[in-house]
Amino acid sequence: MSVESEVSPDGTKLTIAVKGRFDFGSHQAFRDAYERFYKVPELYVVDLKEATYMDSSALGMLLLLRDHAGGDNAEVQVINSNPDVRKILAISNFDKLFDIS
Amino acid sequence: MSALAPVLEPLTILIAEDSAADLLLLSTIVRRQGHQVLTATNGAEAVEVFIRERPQLVLMDALMPVMDGFEAARRIKQLAGEELVPLIFLTSLRESEALAQCLDAGGDDFLPKPYNQLILAAKINAMDRLRRLQATVLQQRDLIAKHHDYLLHEQRVAKAVFDKVAHSGCINAAPNIRYLQSPYALFNGDLLLAAYTPSGDMHVLLGDFTGHGLPAAVGAMPLAEVFYGMTAKGYGLAETLREMNAKLKRILPVDMFCCATLLCLSTQRRVVEVWNGGMPEGYVHEVASGKRTPLASRHLPLGVLSAEAFDDRTEVWPMALGDRVFLLSDGVLDTADANDQLFGAERLQQVFAANREPDRLFEDIEQALAAFRGEARDDVSMVEITLQAGQQLRASGPLYADSGQSCPLDWSVSFEFRAETLKRYNPLPYLLQLLLEIHGLREQSGALYSVMAELYSNALEHGVLGLDSRLKRDAQGFAEYYRQRNDRLAQLNSGYIRVHVQVLPTAAGGRMTLRVEDSGPGFDVEQVLARPLDIDRLSGRGLSLVRQLSSDVRWSDGGRSVCVEFCWEALA
Amino acid sequence: MVDLHLDPEVLSGLQEVMEGEYPKLLDTFLDDSQKRVEALRKARDDAKALGRIAHSFKGSSGNLGAMRLAQLCQRLEVESVGAGVGDLGALVDQIDREFALVKPLYETERQRFQI
């Protein structure tokens, strides 16, 4: 499990890539990924291309990120979700809060 | 003399050696290394000294009189118990068999003769490191065990508190509910609650908090209190959901939420009303046709959205007597077999399809899960509720603390609820509370609430919103009807419902007259009343129900106003 | 390599370790060894006893630098297992003689420390 973050050259977009199991053990790493940037990006992107598994604590982490990013005013995208991840996001209707693809 | 490795801390070392010269030599060497030395000249003496002084390390000659080194070593190791007391054999034995014998007897190492100081010092240090490692492990193990005991105790207390809350519902008393739930469900975050409304409908909640353990359990209690409190007062699903969501949003941290399916099953109206936020889909199982209607998750879980953004829209599905609703936690679909294959929705559908006896459906699912997994799983929650005839209207409502001496007997009151209020407020619980101040009416609270609810709903839906109940003749029509209801209510900006209550004493006791008026166009009362009392038809049940439950129903003002009476006898 | 009767390096090492107790060590060894030699003579007919005593003697003589003596004791220990008592007698004699040889050497060493 690893979490890597990358900020775009103009500082407006922060991409966080979660690899491996996205579960309770990822908590600290995920928070560090966005909390340590002193600038607030306009757009957050969570890339789940290499995420193999996701559970409800991961959903909670996404909510924390959204809250950090401004709550209802936040723009958070979740990209490259595989079918299993899509399913858990769909059942919880998280597409009402996040832009999921 | 070459420098010896520094000693970590001075030890008390027992040296057991029957040769006086060797004993003297060794003792001096060990003392010079900074340790305290105890001596023994035979095995039995070594064991005695060990018992008395409990040295931290032992150097033992293998062959000694009166109890040889091996036997002494075994005894000392036994006396040491869990602690590591390193034991180094002193030996001029050559053969590997003999050396192996040393280690088998419990020796941790051996030191050959003639003694080499450097090797001895190094071995003592190495053994000491191991000794201290073992001591740390034991200490941490004991600390962990102690904390674990605290934790178990806390969980027992939490569970006891919660059980009192959870069992105030009807989950065990109702004859038409079957459920499967682990006794430790609370700590998996699973919640199963059921309670009757004043009119005899049943509210059921199957919930799943994120996380495990006490954090999950902590959210369950406030939620249960809201559920039971509001259901008992007669609040509908929408208000109860709003309140539960607001409460969880307020008290839970941002990353915690509760997936839930909440439903209201009404035997009287032959419908089930459902709200599913984040739970796996449930099913309405039609016994006659074998058709299954999925109750899919359409909402975000509770505790995520703010009050303004929360969506309390429910779906309504018709049900016939004998039909069942199934709700499942994700433990069912996630049950895995030895190869980590998941049970999944398809297998579940197969179980449904293969079932021949509706009464056995619940067991069929249980058995299929157990067979698939190879054993029963203890974190699965599953509930089946059957729509059964003959549900008595529950008279048990909120308990009153008053003595019954003083109650209002001669009064009247009128309300007018206008568009903005109709959109967002359900006045029925309040009205019921008001009417239950009349002690004589308390026995009839079930009937009273049912009648009030029916009259209000007719006034709102047919009168103010202008919906046609004939739409509700099949499942599709149902869906359309409730869609229209939600739309029209959201857009409502004119209209009213007036409620008039008059209470008068009579010779026998008292009489309460309830009149409900709406601003709608009215209807042809005679024509509607002429329709046969077809209790299996989906629409039109309301009026027959009202006529059954109250005395003297009268319409006036072209159908825009309806009046019912409830009488009671004076209490002794 | 032929074992030394008395290895001077071992002795100097012992002296370093024991410091003030060095003379005491020598005394103890001589005392002990005398007893062992007598015990060996007494146990002429008991192979097991001979083996045990030889084992012990081997240890301390090795520690004190009497290498050839140690080696002889080793042989006696080994051969005492399953051998006829007659063969062992010769070895006991050898040990006897070897000790008689090294004993004065230890006594001389001991003399160096008479106050």
Image: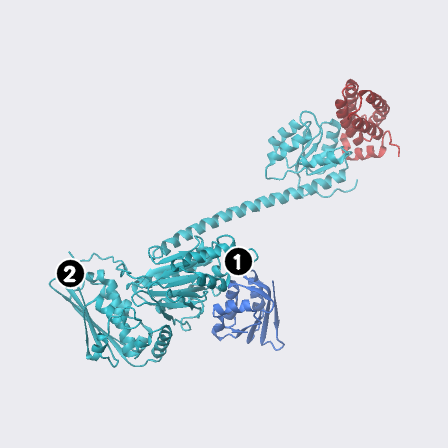
Chain A: its colour in the image is blue
Residue A95 position, x and y percent, is: 49, 72
Q: Quadrant of residue B519?
A: bottom left
Left or right of B219: which side holds B434? left
Q: Quadrant of the N terminus of chain B?
A: top right
Q: In the visual, does C3 lie left or right of B524?
A: right
Q: Mark 2 or 1 closer to N-term? A: 1
How far, Cα to Cα, is label 2 from label 1? Answer: 61 Å
Protein chain holding label 1: B
Q: Colour of chain B?
A: cyan
Q: Residue furthest front?
A: B356
| Chain C: drawing colour | red
Residue A94 drawn at (x, y percent): 49, 70
* Residue B31 in sight: no
Label 2 element class: strand
**Residue B84 placement: quadrant:** top right
* Image coordinates for residue B296, horizontal then vertical, percent: 44, 68
Q: Which residue is mark 1?
A: B336
* Disc 2 and disc 1 in contact, CB within 8 angstroms: no
**Residue B265 screen position, x and y as percent:** 34, 65
Q: Name the kind of residue labelled 1 in the image.
A: Ala
For disc 1, the neighbor class at 10 Å (few under 14, some 14 to 19, many from 20) is: some
- Position above or below: B537 against C39: below
Of residues B106 and A73, which is closer to you in this image?
B106
- The amino acid marked with disc number 2 is Glu
Label 2 belongs to which residue?
A: B569
- Labels 2 and 1 in the same subunit: yes
Residue sitting farthest toward the left: B507
Split into 4 quadrants, where in the image is the C terminus of chain B? bottom left
